[in-house]
Image (tube, helix red, strand yellow):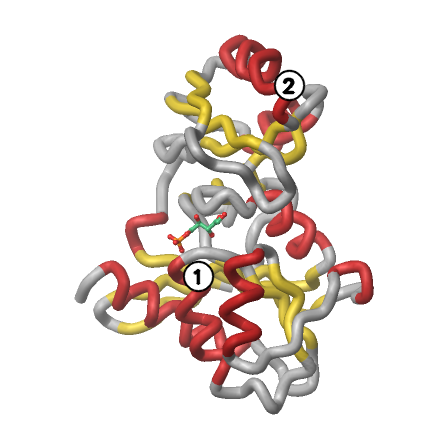
Amino acid sequence: MTQDEMKKEAGWAALNYVEPDTIVGVGTGSTVNHFIDALGTMSDKIKGAVSSSVASTEKLEQLGIKIFDCNEVASLSVYVDGADEINADKEMIKGGGAALTREKIVAAISEKFVCIVDGTKAVDVLGEFPLPVEVIPMARSYVARELVKLGGDPVYREDCITDNGNVILDVYNMKITNPKLLEDQINALPGVVTVGLFAHRGADVVITGTPEGAKIEE
Ligand code: 5RP
């Protein structure tokens, strides 16, 4: 089974968490694209979606799913999104697709975060995948210097402007043994919009696509 087939397995299994007549929170990425395909099969049974990126919005609209502005919605019963890494406490690194800020906002208004991954995303310690940090452009160099003090090696992501008009620093060589503390430390730096650590608001359910089918941890 290819990695993409495992992503598809996880994406379609997440449909079980979607309740009819609700607005669904939708993340971003190649695994989520499979979930969106699945969601398209029940487009007439849901009210619509709150989307975490321009890319997901376009795909949802192509399938006839109505998009709601996040400001119109007080809460969502479920948010489905992928991850770049996830540990046993369901804490994640996200933002490989540069959608971390909107993803964190939609996750924050959701009662249940369903994380869909293939088996390559599970790790004991977060940090092998470079940690994305979305930064206001004028703060890029200052934040990079502060990230070095925190033990990382930040690299400016070339040719990447986020949906919010900001830039991304990818922080290499972090062994993240206390994800909640690091999330707080990086969030506290002036100029940081969002750090791609989802530790305070981790996942509630993890669906892992495997050759033996979707494995579910609640
Ligand atoms: C985008 C994300 C994605 O969820 C993450 O990058 C995983 O992507 P994929 O499903 O393509 O492996 O955080 O900002």
Mark 1 vs mark 2, CA separation in Å = 33 Å
Where residue 70 sits: x, y (%)? 74, 60
Residue 57 vertical placement versus 83 (above, below): below
Where residue 115 sits: x, y (%)? 49, 59
Dot 1 or dot 2, earlier in sequence: 1
Whether residue 86 is visible: no
Q: Which residue is mark 1?
A: 116
Residue 62 vertical placement versus 143 (above, below): below
> Which residue is rendered at x = 58% and y = 26% of the image?
182
Q: Is residue 210 left or right of residue 46?
A: left
> Which residue is rendered at x = 47% and y = 13% of the image?
151
Where residue 79 sits: x, y (%)? 60, 64
Q: Is residue 212 left or right of residue 104?
A: left
Q: Residues within 10 Å of mark 2 (few under 14, many from 20)?
A: some
Q: Secondary structure at mark 2?
A: helix
Q: Which residue is mark 2?
A: 139
Report the mark closest to the observer, 1 or 2: 2
Q: Are marks 1 and 2 in contact (CB under 8 Å)?
A: no
Judging depth in this view, the residue of 173 and 55 nearest the camera is 55
The reply to whether the residue tagged 1 has its Cβ within 8 angstroms of ligand 1 is yes
Residue 142, quarter of the rendered image: top right
Q: Secondary structure at mark 1?
A: strand
> Which residue is rendered at x = 72% and y = 69% of the image?
68
Quarter in which the N terminus is drawn: bottom left
Residue 52, quarter of the rendered image: bottom right
Q: Amino acid at mark 1?
A: Ile
Whether residue 208 is visible: yes
Q: Amino acid at mark 2?
A: Ala
